[in-house]
Each structure stands twice: as C-alpha cells, then as structure tokens.
Amino acid sequence: MKLNNLLAYSFLSAIAFGSIGCEKVLEEAPYSSFTDESVFTTPARATLALNGVYDAAQTGTTTLAGRGYPFGAANVQQGDCRGEDMVNVAAFYQFTYQGTYNPTTTNNVAFWDNTYNMINKANIAIDGFRKVSGSILPTATATQFEAECRFLRALGHLEMLTHFARPYLDGNGARLGIPYREYAVTGSATLDRLKTEPRPTVLYDYQRAIADLNYAESNLPVSQTLGPIRATRGAAIAMKMRAYMHMGKWDSVRIEGNKLIPTTLTPLTPSSTTSLIGGYALQATPGGSFGYTGGNSITSENIFTIKNDPLDNGSVNGALASQYGTNDLAGRGLVSISPIIWNRTEWLANDLRRSALYLQGATNNGTSVATGQAIMTRKYTDYVGRGDNNPIIRWAEVLLMQAEAEARLSAGAVSQRAVDLLNMVRNRASVAPATTQYTVASFATDVDEINAILMERRIEFLAEGKRWADIHRTVQDPITALRPVGIPAKVVNGNTGMAQYGFGLSVTPGQPAIPYSDYRFIWPLPVGEVTQNPIVVQNPGY
C-alpha cells in the first residue's frame, strides 16, 4: 500500500479498536482493527487481533473500502473479468475487462492497498503473538495464531503475484516480483527500512510464500471449531500445491497432494473418497458447496473460505451475489457467463452444472442489468443479505491440481491416475458417469489429457475467479499447445443477449486479444507507491 497510508492505517486502527461497530465475521464477536501492544493484554484481545487480520482479508479499510478487497469478493471479480469466460456487462469492471487500466485505476490501486494493509496487520499480529507467547497466551495457541497469520500473508502475496508480476515460468522466477513484507511497518524506523528495499524477484516471492506455508502446515490444526473460515493444515497444503503449480514444480505438487489424496480412488462415486487430512470430500451434487443457507455453504468440500454474512460483506457494490446475481432476483446482474465457455462442446450438453448452477435466459430468469436476457451464475444466491462466502480453495481444486501434476509427470504417456482424479470431479456432474467418464483411451497423448484437465478447471471454477490465474501460469507453458496468447479475445464489453448462446454455436469475440509481450498483461503498481518510494520501480510500459 502507499507508504503514508501504511502508517496512517496502523495508528488509526488502534483508535478504531476502542470504537468497534456492529458488524461481525467470525462467531458473534464484532471487530475492526488493532496495532499496539495494549491489544495483546488478554487472551480475548489477542484473539480479537487475529480476527482483525481475517477481517482485513475479507473487507479492507483503504481504497474502495467495503467492496470486498482483497478476498471478500474482489479476487473473484477481478480474476473473472481479466479472463474470457465471463462478460462484464456494465462499467464496474470495464477497465479490468478491456485492459485499459493505468497506475491510478481505482480497482487496481484498491487491490494493492488493501492486500498490503492485510499483510501489515498480519505482521503486527505476529509480533504481538510472539511477545505474549507463554504468558498471556499458551505457547501452542500463540504459535497457531502466528501460523494463521502467515497463511493469510502467503495468500495475499500469491494473489498479488498473478496481477502485478510476470509468471514464474518467464525466466524461472527471474522477473521483477512484488515486495514481500515480513515485518510490521508501524513507525519511522520500519518505514525507513522499507524505503531501502527494491522489488525482489518472482522466485524470491515464491520462496518466502512457501516458507510461510510450510510454517503454517507444521503449526495449524487439522480442523477448526469454526470450520474452513479459519486456516487449517489442509488449507496450507492445498495452497502450497497452488504455489508449486504456478512454478511448474509438478513433482512438488504431487508430493503435497499425496498428503491429502488417498491412493485408492472411486471415480464413479466421488463423494465416497475422503481426504487423508481434514475429512474433505466432494459434495454429492455440483451445487452442494454453494448457495446461501443458514450454514452458508460450509461443507466438507470447502477447505478454506472467506466468510461473509448479512451484517458484514462486500456491500451492494462488491458482494458476490450482488454483482453476479441475476437482475430480476434482486442481484445487480453486472457479470454474466460468456458464450465463449458456455458453447464449448467439451462441456457436455447434459452436464448437471449447466442447469444446477446457472440461470438461462427467459426459461428460468437469467437477466443482466445491461442487455436483458443472459446466462447468470447462481453459485451465490443471497441477493438481499449478500452473505455468500468466497470459496478460496475447494476439494475439487485439489483433485484437479493433482490430476494435472500426474499428467505432466507421465513422461509422455496418458496417466491413469490423472484420469481417475479428473473423473472424480467430472462424474459428479454427469447424468450417466459410467458411459460418459474419461478412460485412458479417451486421449491420444498426455497433452490431450492435460488439455482436458485445464478445460475441466474452466468449467468447474466458472464464476469463482480462477480463470486469470490459469492464464497467467500457462502463458509461458513449455507445452506449446497449451499456451494462451496473452489476455484472450473476449466478447465485447457489455454485450450479452441469448442469441449468442447455444451448444456448439461458434462465437466471434469482438474484443481482440492482448499479446503476452504487451505491457498490459500485468497491472501497473499504484502511482502513489512508486512516487513515494522510488526504489520500488514501476512495471515497464506504464
């Protein structure tokens, strides 16, 4: 975040601690922010400090405060609108969708500011937990709280890498990364230190994130009383899988995945396979881990999720149901499904996800705010209360990450284990899995198998914000056939309407692709960051 803001928010948050409002995120305890050592004088206050870090992950306190930055909803919306599988149908994400951002664009600045605000709060909390370990807090509790903060710190840095830095595979991590903040900035001394530290490499960032996640894995519990809205050992392992996947370290992805996934799989009955740690399993139906209810979709499939509720969420301007929800059901209808993905024949016409998770035009009330009939997601359904959680990591992602690792490590052959893992996710959405599931014979080469896994990711995680991360990591993929050109061609901003949708119907994108070589492939650093701290250089081209 901007340097002057970094100090301001640290000190102001200490004041805010004494005037907590009526919002809540975890349990019934409302909380805001914290900084100074007085916060850590009792176990209850120390716990409140930890809650403050989670709250900062859900809804930031800087630019565009309250709109779900960085992880309340914003990472989903930005990740979707940078890709081609969703259509921005209003002005909200137009800069993101069209690639017309600059160093002052509010959404980009908000992502940077609020993520580093969360990271700074995590670092302040870590210092506090270390100081009261063995006195105010039992040592084991203080260590666990630190591990939760380090998990969130890694999560923030890894998300930022996909937007503000070139991918690891471009030079094996040698390109400019982002500042990896591992100490709290609370005064002039730490501010002066920060001004001496240039941007590190992408490799350095991944190394530090993995170190944080290793610590988290070693010191987090297998389960939490509040469920997946608090970090666990399984969440740390899953996040390491994601980090190694972006690095192309497929052997490491497999090693981490083997900690979670049983050797024996039952692809035809995916819900019967339970993880080795944490009890994770697929829900029986594609929509089983979505849809706002009293429990807000906290199921065995959710490994880590950012909690929202009707009293504390990204607001009408940021919450998932508000932005993605169909206009005629009290959503705002701002982001719809693109015909680019909807029309793909690889997505079977009778796939249960088509009917269970999406609203299709006049037949079942799918409307966007701009163009009337469209196909809208119903993964998020609390249109009025806006309490839908943000599913950061699901068990389906772990299965597909491991499938991709197995396929990429198969030495040119088609991998049976990759097929089994892929089928676990795909079969759940099939009306007749025995006849439609993949076999080894379905693929002529390992590249075909990898392509099928990547397509399954696009289908399974549609409207969950993961498309951009997959584009970012595969744009320099050594298997040429898988390599995107850069930012893909898209349907014209604001242009939907049911006439474009149809199984197998060809789509002519009206917005041209932006090649990887173009400076716009990654976001600019905020202007305030580079003007106030010149040692942190701007991304080329801006």
Image (cartoon, helix red, strand yellow):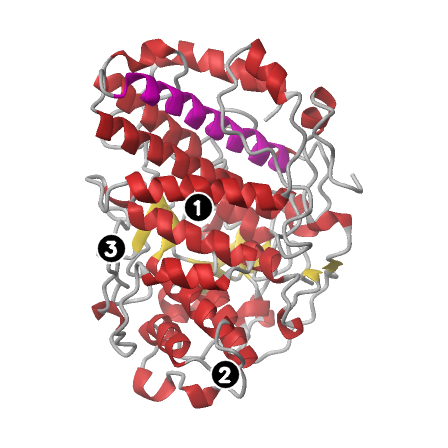
For residue 413, which numbered disc appears in the image?
2
- Amino acid at pointer 2: Ala
Q: Relative to residue 263, is residue 382 depicted above or below?
A: above
Measure the alpha-carbon separation of dots 3 and 2: 30 Å
Measure the alpha-carbon separation of dots 2 and 1: 41 Å
Labels 2, 1: front one: 2
Circle 1 residues within 10 Å: few <14, some 14–19, many ≥20: many
Q: Residue at x 75, y 59 (%)?
A: 515
Q: How many marks?
A: 3
Q: Residue at x 47, y 74 (%)?
A: 407
* In magenta stretch: residue 108: yes
Instruction: Provide the residue designation for mark 1.
Output: 320
State the extent of the magenta-drawn residues as a range.
107-133
Image position of 237 (left or right of 529): left
Local secondary structure at mark 3: loop
Q: Earlier in the sequence, mark 2 or mark 1?
A: 1
